[in-house]
Amino acid sequence: MNKPRIFAVAACSAILAACSGLSASEQAQTDTTAVSIAPLVDIYDTVWIRTSDGSVRTLNQVADDLSQYDVVFFGEFHGHSGIHLAQMQVFRALQQRYPDMTLSLEQFERDTQPLVDQYLAGEIGEKVLEEDARAWPNYEQSYRPLVEFSKDNGLPVVAANAPKQAVICVSKKGPEILDSIPMPDRSWSAAELHIEEGAYLDKYRSFIENSSTHGADKKDSDDAAKNDRCVDSEANSGEEDNKTETETGKNTHVMAPTQGTDEEMSAMMQAMIMKSFSSQVLRDDTMAESITLHLQDNPNRKVLHLDGNFHSASHLGTVERLKLRMPELKIAVINPIAVEDNQSPAWTAEDAATGDYILLVREVPEMFVCEARELEFQRKTIKKRMGNKCVYSEDAAHLEE
């Protein structure tokens, strides 16, 4: 395993653990359908596809169908305006058909539930909610409409996700650190994690390992042309990297073990992947447990849950962990698919397998036009996350004794 490959693995691991919404470019686009669909003319345009028969459906038809389910998972590319509009439309349509709906959000952590409840009751203002409940930076644009709809209609909102501090600790020290987190902090994360081998771990490994091939070994002409357009950026990036290394004494290019035999490095890399996967699963199991606890306390309610699409695509992640806890539930999954051609939207059999419904959306603008700037962004992201410290230690659990 060469050094650029190791860096790419570390970068993908850090970014995926932070976001868990698959990049649209990761969606497979082979063996596309031949169904004729109107062009997606702007970022808000979407097309609903029922995957059981490949039919194009209207919003009302989708809502009629999904209203028969106990829990609907709506995966997202975080920040995609068209997806967030569709989420609001579906939630409103479901509530019209079944008044006792609940909104469940990855975007609030479970320890902030009292603040969410206070906001819904009108006891605190939105700025307090955003700051004290640690709302995501895109809250106002992406999630405010759903929360306000819930507030106006007296609907519960579940702060479903695991606290960031617990996720950081698990990613750095492994799931064993959870045993050292004192109460009540420990109660904000799932009591039981499912980290065993299976389709979800295979998918996680594949995503990271396949993404790690993007980098120094990619030679196609399009990438070469992009890199030609940003020679100055590459030079500037290198100067900044050297400055950083001089000031910190640390090499920010490689954030993973680089010495030892191939077998030793492979073993260390797999250990890193498993820690990263454990932090991903901590989110999945906590969200699944949060929904479970809410439904046990409110047995007549139905839930719309929003999460990054990696958490729910193909009924894996949070979905399978909810099913383990409540096997009797009828669960549906909506998964977004970014099309390659906005003028002739299409999808594949592989896309169709990711949800009961897929939502065809426009690709968002490219984040980068050259590899050098992308690597610079990855290095900054990794450096920032490497700077996150676990606030808990093995002695922390004894502090309350």
Image (spheres, rainbow, N blue to C red):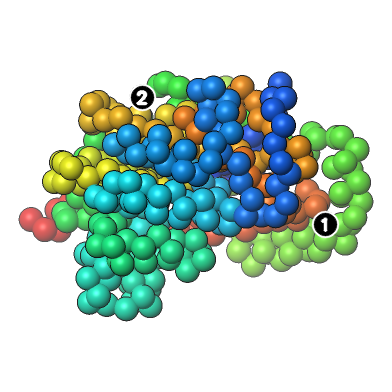
Location of the C terminus (image quadrant): bottom left
* Secondary element at image label 1: helix
Give the image quarter of residue 238: bottom right
Mark 2 closeness class: few <14, some 14–19, many ≥20 residues within 10 Å: few
**Pointer 1 or 2: first along the chain:** 2
Residue with the mark numbered 1: 234
- State the residue at coordinates (53%, 41%): 58
Which residue is depicted at the point 22% across and 40% down?
Answer: 292
Image depth: mark 1 or mark 2 in front: 2
Location of residue 120 in the rendering, given as x and y in whole percent from the top left corner: 26, 68
Q: Secondary structure at mark 2?
A: loop
Whole-number angstrom distance, CA of label 1 to CA of label 2: 41 Å
Q: Give whichever of 300, 212 is nearer the camera.
A: 300
Q: Can you say which quadrant of the picture contains the N terminus?
A: top right
Relative depth, front residue between 98 and 399: 98
328 to 145, vertically: above or below? above
Q: Position of residue 2 (x, y in %)?
A: 70, 32
Q: Tell me if 376 is positioned left or right of 236 in this view.
A: left
- Left or right of 283 in this view: 189: left
Q: Which mark is residue 196?
A: 2
Residue pictured at 50% horizontal, 23% vertical: 52
Disc 1 crowd, CA 10 A, few/some/many (<14, 14-19, 20+)? some
In this image, 394 relative to 275: left or right? left
Towards the viewer: 258 or 84: 84
The residue under label 2 is which amino acid type? Glu
- 109 over 317 or under it: above or below: below
Q: Could one spot residue 92 in this view of the protein?
A: yes
The amino acid pointed to by label 1 is: Glu
Image disc number at residue 256: none
Percent from the top left, x then y, of residue 278? Answer: 39, 37
Q: Is 306 or 33 nearer to us in this picture?
A: 33
Q: Image point 59% across, 33% down: which residue? A: 56
